[in-house]
Amino acid sequence: MLDVGDTLPIVTVLDDRGRSRSTREFLGKYLVLYFYPKDDTPGCTSEAHQFRDAGEEFTRAGAEIVGVSRDTVVSHQRFKEKFALPFTLLADVSSELCDAFGVIVEKNMYGKKSMGIARATFLIDPKGKIAHAWPKVKVEGHAREVFTALTGKELSADSNSSACAVPGKN
């Protein structure tokens, strides 16, 4: 998995509108690139809500939020619409971006092993260097943690809650 000091890999994937997007496009400002397993599942929805609710504060701090999963463009469109997500979601169906960051891991659910995305977040500086990495994200309070790493400040009370989280599911 990539770590602090590593360089942003330049990879092109489709976004939630079906447009081809290169990670190169995100250079020049801070980028919060968060990888999550699956659209519209409890933990992933809670995490998306946190970033959505804090989105304006991240924007004022000069950062763009981008979510990445291996879901399709259509799945991302539905997820964004259902939860009014204002940020870009990248559809890495080929796992090229996930592989470049090293977030594909073996998972074991009920004795069944499969390869999937490890929930991870990377704060990338305007020059394309990873400034901070969270290789094993705990959903609760994660956006707050990322914002503090970015600014050294706490999120405001308005965006500092996970009131939209699915109760008991993280």
Image (cartoon, rainbow, N blue to C red):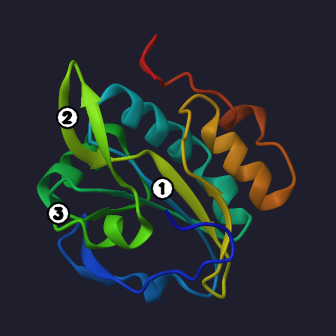
Count residues near mark 3 (Cα–Cα under 10 Å), then give few for <14, some for 14-19, many for 20+. Answer: some
Residue visible at 27% across and 42% down in the picture: 38
Residue 108, given in percent of the width and then of the height, sits at 27, 30
For this orientation, the residue located farthest to the top is 168
Q: Is residue 60 above or below residue 135?
A: below
For this orientation, the residue located farthest to the right is 152
Q: Which residue is mark 1?
A: 34
- Asked if labels 1 and 2 touch by Cβ distance under 8 angstroms, the answer is no
Q: Which residue is mark 2?
A: 113
Please report whichever mark, 2 or 3, sits nearer to the chain's N-terminal start.
Answer: 3
Q: Amino acid at mark 3?
A: Val
Q: Which residue is mark 3?
A: 93
Count residues near mark 2 (Cα–Cα under 10 Å), then give few for <14, some for 14-19, many for 20+. Answer: few
Q: Amino acid at mark 2?
A: Lys
- Asked if labels 1 and 3 touch by Cβ distance under 8 angstroms, the answer is no
- As measured in the structure, the alpha-carbon distance from the residue carrying label 3 to the one carrying label 1 is 16 Å
